[in-house]
Amino acid sequence: LVILTADTPVLDNPGGVIFTSRLTPECPLSLSSCPFTPAQPITFHFLNPEYLVVISIDGGLWLSLDFGAVWTKVHEGTQSFTWGSGITLFFSFSPKGTVEADRRGELLLKRTEDLGKTFTTVLHSIFSFGYVGGFLFTSVIETLGAPRVIYVSSDQGDHFNKAQLPSASTEQFYSVLDGDEDMIFMHVDNPGEESYFGTVYTSDDRGIVYSKSLERHLFGGEGKSDFTNVTSMRGVYLTNILEEDGRIRTVISFNRGGEWKLLNKPQNVECGEDSRNDCNLHIHGEHSQYNGITPMLPLSDPTAVGLVIAHGSVGDSISSARPDVYVSNDGGYKWRGALRGAHHYSILDSGGLVVAVEAHPRDGQINTIKFSTDEGQCWKVYNFTEQPIFFAGLTSEPGTKTMNISVWGYRPEDDDQPMWVVVTIDFQSLITRECGNQDYVQWLAHATEGGDSATEGCVLGYKEIFRRLRKLSICRNGRDYVVSRRKSPCPCTREDYLCDYGYYRHENSSECMRQLDTADHALEVCLNGEEEELRTSGYRKVPSDRCEGGFTPLRREETVNRHCGNSSQPPTASPYSETPREKMVLIVVCVGVGIVILVAVATAVYTVRRMVYGNRAPTYRFSFLQLQDDDRSIAANPESVTSSNGTSVFQVDSDDELIE
């Protein structure tokens, strides 16, 4: 499914037009009018792509239940929205329609569980919210003048509990990086107006107690993070850190944030003279894509076991010079240089086929596509058109089971007007043989050379042996292909545990040490209105870890039987909330003059701050990753194309996961 939106200079049409297509020969591109102008890309429902939702430029929340044929405006003054469980839709709005209500904590959070027919107010006076992995997060101020804190709900907003995280000032923010029903990765911005980094914390399975996972995590002024979940391998995450000397370097975790390390240098790439003693692979992420250095983010898929494709550079830190394409077939342990220069790429046939198109050809036009049947080691070229086109992007149906890829582009006509062209390539005509049993091998995930045979491949408490396609087999997995795996449990070790709240992992050691600032404090958690005291020896098992026996440290939670607040609503206080009349009289009599002075000072400070923040240009501010002013830069395009698997032909910014 693909949707294209466009503005039209038609007086009787308040919005634009929408082109929809299901990318099949019997369902060509169809056109319908739009009663509004979208302020952002249209969002599909994750289970039913017929359900569409979007915010218009005037703050209206619009919903379609028939793939854009009919639209209904269900609410006014909307700031942001996200789908929850099932057909539940959460959204924040400003009841008074005031400017920057989110900056002052004046938003209301609502939900609808019947697609806009009825609404329930979940919270008052919030700054922002997010929904990841079944957890609903909201940022609030508990008392006037206090910093913001995070509250979490695991039951669609019926009850909230305070997250054990550092509080955030007005210059800081929270961001949910990734998560599922077992664990959340949360970024907490570092204090300071322009720090551009923070700390990553990981939660327990309730989303309440958090442990420090990674320091100096890069998070730029544009609201972009390079944090990436490698979905082709269990427990693997990639991200970038900002070193104290200004270098940006890539780190990887193979056990859900328990430990981070630098990436290994690719086997077929040499290091420069100036970085031979400190040479690793560094991966480009959202920052680079936002600034036009790379056209695509790292790519992986659960059906293509172990396969990761990404743009990167080799050296002591990431470089803005021409990025190349690198491929790993074991989830990030080992890498190979695959293609020179920036490319658009896609995974097809459950990893049995990889295709790529050069992002910046010399004359700007293309008529060939590259493809590989051995996970990027060898590439062949296929000429798909006699008339070259100016390339715009690749798109395919959701998932990786298809062998079809559509190449988008345009070519100028005689009147110099561009004509859009879509060429769909069916690789079944090139790869005709179906794979048989002889084409597959058994492969142990997370296996490393020289490891202990008893624990080899043990990650998060168990081993996995997959049935994978041989690299030398040129055949197709087909649509009926299903990933086959065998699991076996492992004994527990320290690697199966995170350091608990108030503890940290000592450098070059798996031992958890007590933080000095929490040495004399017991951790008390308010859970559903009852206070619990955490007794721990410093270790907390990684959520979703399935190890058995072995290392088993003490950890238990005891109910203290003390009431600790409302279990359904967090205490909130808007900095601009109204005061009762009788109290106002007393305040005016006593401190009227003081308020005038304070307001004047606060207004001056706020104005200066807004001038500073308002003039912050969205550019790279890191000395080791500056944009190059050459012809390889990618021009921004205001049009957007969105597919139901999240692929964009024209890239569109999204800060939905930012919780300020």
Image: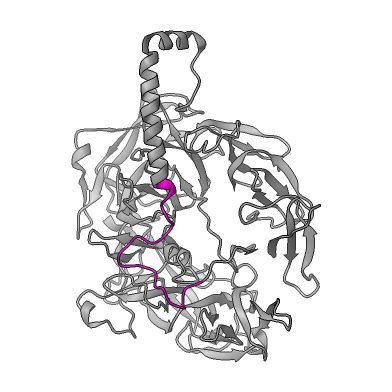
Left or right: residue 65 versus residue 383 is right
Front residue of this view, candidates 265 and 219: 219
| Residue 18 placement: quadrant | bottom right
Q: Is 304 above or below relative to 219? A: below
Dominant SS in magenta: loop
Q: Is 567 above or below relative to 540? A: above
Left or right: residue 375 versus residue 436 is left
Residue 436 visible in the current orientation: no
| Residue 564 placement: quadrant | top left
Residue 533 belongs to magenta span: no
Residue found at x 26% / y 72%: 316
Left or right: residue 516 versus residue 359 is left
Q: Is 365 above or below relative to 165? A: below
Q: Is 152 above or below relative to 71? A: above
Q: Which residues are magenta?
A: 613-634
Q: Residue 148 placed where, x, y %?
A: 40, 35
Left or right: residue 35 versus residue 58 is right
Instruction: State the quadrant of the N terminus.
Output: bottom right
